[in-house]
Amino acid sequence: MEDYRHILFATDLGPECQLVGRRALSLARRYEAELTLIHVVEYMVAEPSYDLMVPSPTEVENNLVDSARGQIRAVARDLGIPGANCRVEMGTTKGEIVRVAEETGVDLIVVGSHGRHGIGLLLGSTANAVLHGAPCDTLAVRIPTEQG
Ligand code: AMP
């Protein structure tokens, strides 16, 4: 098997992201691979007609992106890699992760997976969506739930 050269760690900036990030970092170190962090801001407005629309850039969106930039830098800092390459993109989570992976020659995407059951499974998860669209290997790091 070829060594991984560029690993993309997708983070939702949530409390469990350090667990997933540590796995991505450990693989990056093992393979001496480049590591990029990505967070996608998925902002949608519901019109009174209840149609979902992706709005054009607004001040609200810019604030969300600015805030996410600060948070993703904090994630990198907490992982002990303050100088890491961090990207904040706007759009659909799966679409942006796959696009960035394709455009930057990523050969491994690392995401978290809650291993949901029931309705959560029916609705699908980000890990599942990324796995089906990814141009490369995808590692879904299991995030323990209260049920184990
Ligand atoms: P979820 O399906 O929402 O439980 O998310 C599972 C995993 O997908 C997270 O642990 C992250 O690795 C990734 N993920 C979810 N939302 C985002 C996001 N907005 N930006 C980047 N990665 C995300």
Image: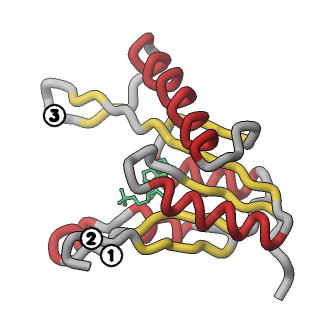
Query: Which residue is outermost to the bottom?
Result: 1
Where does label 2 land, which residue? 145
Instruction: Classify 10 Å Cα crowding around label 3: few (below 14), some (14-19), many (20 and above).
Output: few
Q: Which marked residue is nearer to the observer: mark 1 or mark 3?
A: 1
The structure residue drawn at horizontal position 55% and vertical position 42%, both measured from the top left corner, is: 75
Q: Quadrant of residue 26?
A: bottom right
> In the rendered structure, are the residues bearing label 2 and label 1 in contact, judged by CB atoms less than 8 Å apart?
yes
Which label's residue is closer to the chain start, 2 or 1? Answer: 1
Instruction: Farthest residue to the top: give it.
Output: 59
Say above or below: 5 vs 147.
Answer: above
Q: Amino acid at mark 1?
A: Gly
Q: Is residue 40 above or below residue 110?
A: above
What mark, if any, has residue 50 been given in the picture? 3
Residue 110 image offset from top left, x and y in percent? 59, 65
**Label 2 crowd (10 A; few <14 / some 14-19 / many >=20):** few
- Tell me: is circle 3 under 8 Å from ligand 1: no
Which of 94 and 142 lies nearest the eye of the viewer?
142
Under circle 1, the secondary element is loop
In the rendered structure, the answer to whether residue 116 lies left or right of residue 69 reads: left
Amino acid at dot 2: Thr
For label 3, the SS is loop
Give the mark nearer the N terminus: 3 vs 2: 3
Residue that mark 1 sits on: 115
CA gap between label 3 and label 2 equals 33 Å
Q: Residue at x 44, y 24 (%)?
A: 64
Q: Earlier in the sequence, mark 1 or mark 3?
A: 3
Query: In front here: 10 or 75?
Result: 75
- Kind of residue sitting beneath label 3: Tyr
Where residue 32 appears, as percent x and y from the top left, is 85, 65
Neighbor class of circle 1 (other Cα within 10 Å; few <14, some 14-19, many 20+) is some
Q: Which dot, 2 or 1, sits closer to the camera?
A: 2
